[in-house]
Amino acid sequence: MSAPAWSALLRDAAARLTAAGIDSPRVDAELLLAHVLGLDRGALLARVFAGAVAEPAQAAAFETLVGRRAAREPVQHLTGVAHFHGLDLAVGPGVFIPRPETELLVETVVADLAVRPTAGVVVDLCTGSGAIAAAVAAWGEARGRPLAVTAVELDPTVADWAQRNLAPRGVDLRQGDALVACPDLEGRVDVVVSNPPYVPEAEVPAQPEARLDPARALYGGDAPGLRVPRAIAHRAADLLAPGGLFAMEHHETQGPALLATLGADPRFTGVRVHQDLTGRDRFLTARRSCDAAAGAEVEE
């Protein structure tokens, strides 16, 4: 019996994942086969087009992973890697898998840093896997502007994952409560960024994969999911230097409530809610004020 071509393996796997309701069956199949073969996806596709065939052990390992993916294990858990803002991050069970929409938050932060005359001091509260902190630090490295980035994570298991991603980039990871974190940096921070737990308590994630994310990373601490985001905003105001930027992801339903909260706080000014690529409210920005004036508006 001849060895199966990689193209045939991918075709059959994509069909199986489609039947299981996977949103991106072909891409997931390619990522899993690339993982089995120790290749990146681009190299895999080049070999597929060249007519490469699989060894029996490779085909068997791939079949096992496809079965687990069809059972709705996240592809990132199966490969141990999450792709985020050009980085490959170590992830696995117990840590929140970073989402593509959070890259918009990173873009907002680095755009602010890009116009600052000095390198910048950045604090990432509720860092999780370290995705945001790692992406910001990598941006600074690529431009010869090493940043002083500090990341804070409460959960010790999650902090272990974060350490894998942040240590190579020189980020100062602190395990502890984000709501009282970094007292030594109060009033000195240029940017505070956060993707905190914010899901309303009654909401169940639609995708089975998302239900495997740790509840502590998802739920915002009260019925509307606002307790933690509001507390993060309060801590950000303590940490920021005058004129510093606060950027925080939030639930699509929380924009008006957070506008009201931050708009009523004289420590903030220029509060804005921004939409994601689907037009849903997704994150807010605000500036640390030097006076009692504070404004609020929704970005069109």
Image: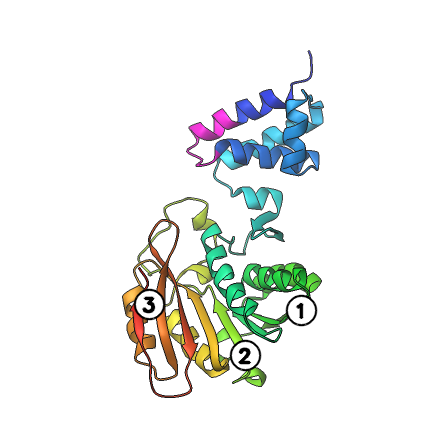
Instruction: Measure how far apart labels 2 and 1 are at the Cα level.
Output: 15 Å
| Nearest the eye: 289 or 79 | 289
Residue at 38% across, 88% down? 291
Circle 2: residue type: Val
| Nearest the eye: 272 or 3 | 272
Q: Nearer the viewer, mark 2 or mark 3?
A: 2
Residue at 38% across, 79% down? 268
In the picture of the structure, the residue carrying the numbered disc 2 is: 189
In the picture of the structure, the residue carrying the numbered disc 1 is: 146
Measuring from the top left, give residue 249's x and y in whole percent: 42, 63
In the picture of the structure, the residue carrying the numbered disc 3 is: 222
Secondary structure category for the residue under label 3: loop
- Is residue 228 depicted above or below 70 in this figure? below
Residue 153 visible to an observer of this rendering: no
Circle 1: residue type: Pro
Q: Nearer the viewer, mark 2 or mark 1?
A: 1
* Label 2 Cα crowd, 10 Å radius (few <14 / some 14-19 / many 20+): many
Instruction: Measure how far apart labels 1 and 3 are at the Cα level.
Output: 38 Å
Measuring from the top left, give residue 25's x and y in whole percent: 49, 32
Secondary structure category for the residue under label 1: loop
Quarter-of-image position of residue 267 = bottom left
Q: How many marks?
A: 3
Magenta part of the protein: which range? Answer: 14-24
- Viewport quadrant of the C terminus: bottom left
Question: Which of the marked residues, 1 or 3, is nearer the chain's N terminus?
Answer: 1
**Color encoding of the figure:** rainbow
